[in-house]
Image: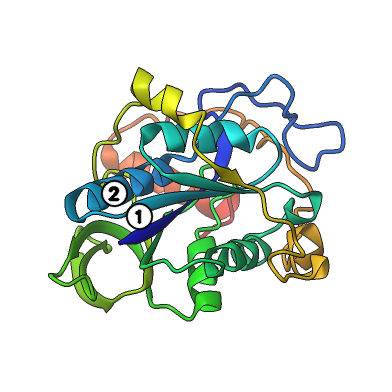
Amino acid sequence: MRIAVCMKQVPDTEARLRVNREGSWIDEEDVAFVINESDEFALEEALTIAEKIGGEVVVIGLGPERVKESLRKGLALGAARAVHLKEDAFLGGDAVATGRALAAAIQREEFDLVLTGSQSDDVGYGGTGSVVAGHLGWPHAWLVMGIELEEGGSHAKVTREMESGLNEIVRIALPAVFEVQAGINHPRYASIKGIMQAKRKPMDEPSVEELGLDSAQIGSAGSRLEVVSVAFPKSGAGAEMIEGDPQTAARILVEKLQKEAKVL
């Protein structure tokens, strides 16, 4: 079983963020970057499957030089190899452009399964895995909370998280793309031995040309979506407490919703 895991590097959710001078994104100076949360769960699921039935896990990341740190962590946790799409032409893409680039990297090899996180912690498109599956021509499932491979490895029984506390169980033929939800497992920590071994594991850096792509199809040039500006939400004027018995408070609230908020 050969499994590819797409991992994104995102700003640490504990970091204090500032908008850059252009107002186009956050100021990345002095900001710590980490592996996207649900991608960590996807990696753990891939490693668990490979350990159970045998196989190889390859981590794939797209982004600038700093992304190497996250890929090295993936190698330290147990992945065999890494692929880093680092050329400037790959950067700044939306889900469509990024998914196209990742799919091209995956198509260079024969994989039985591709795992991604359900969505990123920074922009939260939740669409990259679907785009990857579309370009590969493979079936896919989103919000996956359980993966059980059938004997022989030709199909997988997948549990998906639905609304209203319901789950859906589907049987999907492999190869396929599964977008994993955070909480599916318990991600492991890297050991000292794993960290040392990661330094000797290969990390491929294919170019745009090697992937057979046109630079106009990927990165910011190939994006359908443009981020016009980024800003912190304006703070409100504070809460207003309504005094009185329930009937009086309800009447005052309705009046305010009608005359002040104008939502009724």
54, 12: nearer the viewer? 54
| Residue 237 visible somewhere in the drawing | yes
Quadrant location of residue 225?
Answer: bottom right
| Mark 1, residue position | 180
Residue at the spot 81% in from the left edge and 39% down from the top edge: 23
Residue 103's label in the rendered image is none
Q: Amino acid at mark 1?
A: Val
Establish if 225 lies above or below 67. Answer: below
Task: Please tell me how many numbered marks the rendered image carries.
Answer: 2
Whether residue 40 sits left or right of residue 123 in the image: it is left
User: Who's the residue at 57% across and 23% down the image?
Assistant: 15
Q: Is residue 239 visible?
A: no
Other residues around mark 2 within 10 Å, as few (<14) / some (14–19) / many (≥20): many
Camera-nearest label, 1 or 2: 2
At a point 35% along the width and 22% down the height, the residue shown is 193
* Display coloring: rainbow
* Closer-to-camera residue (234/176): 176
Q: Earlier in the sequence, mark 1 or mark 2?
A: 2
Q: Position of residue 168 (x, y in %)?
A: 20, 69
Q: Amino acid at mark 2?
A: Glu
Secondary structure, mark 1, is strand
Q: Looking at the image, which residue sits at the far right? A: 22
Q: Give the spatial CA distance, label 1 vs label 2.
A: 9 Å
**Label 1 close to label 2 by CB (< 8 Å):** yes
User: Circle 2 sits in a helix, a strand or a loop, which is it?
Assistant: helix
> Which residue carries the number 2 mark?
45
Q: Please state the horizontal and vertical placement of residue 231, each as a whole percent of the image.
A: 72, 38
Q: Residue 118: x and y, percent? A: 42, 55
